[in-house]
Image (spheres, rainbow, N blue to C red):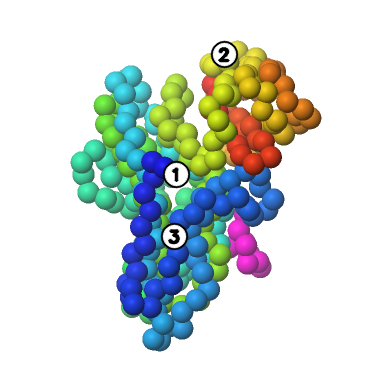
Amino acid sequence: MASWSAWQLPENPGVWESRDWVLESALPKGRPGKGVFGADPINGDCNANLQNGIIRLESPVINAPATMVSDYKLAFYHNVSTEFLWDGLNIKYKLNNGNWSILPQSAFLVNAYNASLNTSVQGNDNPMQGEPAFTGSDEGGYSGSWATSVVDLASLGFNENESIQFRFEVGTDGCNGAVGWYIDEIYVYSCSTALSVDSFSFLDENLTVTPNPSNGLFTLNNSKNIELEAVKIYDINGRIIKTIILNSSVTQQNIKLTDVASGVYFVKVTSAFNSKTFKLIKN
């Protein structure tokens, strides 16, 4: 998270219970590796102890090169559990040197915001009141499920020779809460290039996958014999299509994707404590 910035923006600083985005290793649903977490804590009393505010995680600036590419997308794998309609989570973006705007629901290709938060007229003192957001949790439960959301950045005007930046925000009202927002991986990519791939828990930079792109035969190169546990291959919608269990340190591991369609896939390599994710292109 060294290149990312985090802020706390309380409406009532005098009683605000400090909380910030953190790197979290105990991910819900037994998910391996690490992710970032922004809390939606159960606190406040909606009277004198008002906990309404925003915690913000801001990305570095992401630049698109002059490659004649115009199909850039944002994808992120996340788990949501908030107080339904009162607390919520959304993303703001800034294109080039423009103003910050809410990432619109219309830009999502997969898993868009599921509701708009209650407004101030409805009694909501959340500073994100009325905004479209991810809100609530699994039906009949208190926790969320992991899912991938995909956003068409071209629809926002992000193309070659331009820059974009994101803010992931958790907004809370004056009291109550749930769990919060876990995010494991964030990608900005096109079908031909990856501009940003963050898993927030990179292994040392001695793992590579070659050749890439390829016709479906890839090799994971482990130059320092790191003790690895598993390789998981995901499609663009976050579905696991193949798992390879690694029982010992290996210098090379074949990854065969000849039986899947051409396109973009993500390979997550895990050790006991960390993970690294690669974007693969199968021709």
Report the residue at 39% width, 45% height from top: 4
Residue 20 circle label: 3
Mark 3 residue crowding within 10 angstroms, few (<14) / some (14–19) / many (20+): some
Residue 190 circle label: none
Above/below status of 14 relative to 215: below
User: Over which residues does the magenta segment extend?
Assistant: 136-145
Residue 1 circle label: 1
Mark nearest the camera among 2 and 1 is: 1
Q: Nearer the viewer, residue 96 or 56?
A: 56
Report the residue at 44% width, 60% height from top: 20
The x, y position of residue 67, in whole percent, is 33, 19
Q: Nearer the viewer, residue 241 or 267?
A: 267
Q: Earlier in the sequence, mark 2 or mark 1?
A: 1
The local secondary structure at tag 2 comes to loop
Question: Mark 2 highlights which residue?
Answer: 211
The local secondary structure at tag 3 comes to loop
Residue type indicated by callout 2: Pro
